[in-house]
Amino acid sequence: MIGRLVAMKKKTRRILLVVLSLFTAALVAASGGMLSLIQMSAEQSRVPVIANASETSRPEEAALQCLPDDATNIILRGVHEHESTAGGYTHQMTYYLFGLTSEGQWQEWAVMDFEGVCGITYTTAWGETLSEHVDMDVARSLRLQSYRTIAESIGGIEELKKGILAPDDYLGGMDSYGNERLPTFAPEDIWALHQLGIYPPEDTYTIQEIEPYVPGQLSQ
């Protein structure tokens, strides 16, 4: 289940957008050199940064081989073990969620490891949600772990909550008529934030309509 490799062409523009949903951030044009909380956590995180995939013997070693060759600042943000049944057989797969820098852009990649063979299941460059490429329970688990990692790197859940609920940050760019629009977030993002006790006001965002993931489907 190896998807396409697409270079990320759009930069993130607001701190809230990147914290709430890397998917949304991938669709929003940059407006200056503001670092996102995600990017800052890559520099400050207490989670070890994997500097060189070829020098590691970590469990995620196979998954690292599917990351772009120029990837730097690689941080493991989540791991989820998942069983899938097909053709009467049960398969054990491990999903890894990485944050990394590639082609000068901060990106997020989800990679599946199946018996030592890796496959790319999602990148923010695709402009879609994580849950459109993996089962919802996998997407929720990885997203929740990711937010916990971010919170740890910036001082805790309360600091994450303050940043997300800052009223001035609810901007999702402009529509074709020049009007400000609300940011659109993936269902798994909102679910994960709720598990952490963070409830963005419902009138400050919209939830992305997704095409449900079908096991075994290939990325288009």
Image: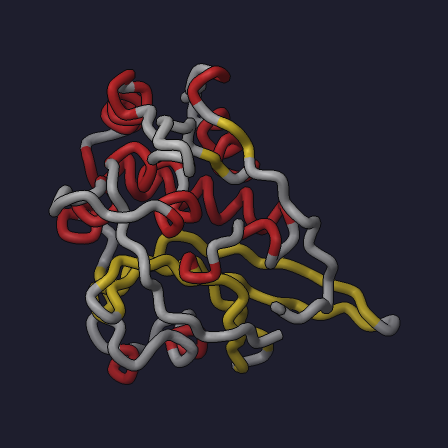
Question: Residue at point 61% right, 53% down?
Answer: 132
Image quarter (top left, top right, bottom left or bottom right) of the N terminus: bottom right
User: Is residue 85 or residue 10 the one in the foreground?
Assistant: 10
Q: Position of residue 12 (x, y in %)?
A: 27, 47
Q: Is residue 83 left or right of residue 27?
A: right
User: In the rendered view, would you say 114 is above or below 25?
Assistant: below
Q: Is residue 120 above or below residue 16?
A: below
Position of residue 135 measured from the top left corner of the image (x, y, whole percent): 65, 52
Front-most of residues 186 and 73: 186
**Depth check: 198 or 6 in front?**
6
Above or below residue 2? Residue 153 is above
Q: How is the image coloured?
A: secondary structure
Is 25 placed left or right of 143 in the picture? left
Does residue 172 appear anywhere in the picture? no
Q: Quadrant of the C terminus?
A: bottom right
Q: Look at the picture and state if 147 lies above or below 51.
A: above
Taking 31 as reference, is 198 left or right?
A: right
The residue most toward the right is: 88
Residue at point 60%, 58% (across, down): 133
Instruction: Give how far across and how far down residue 156 sits, in percent.
Output: 25, 29
Residue nearer the viewer, 137 or 61: 137
Q: Residue at x 25, y 52 (%)?
A: 47
Position of residue 175 measured from the top left corner of the image (x, y, whole percent): 41, 35
Q: Residue at x 63, y 45 (%)?
A: 210
Q: Can the viewer see residue 190?
A: yes
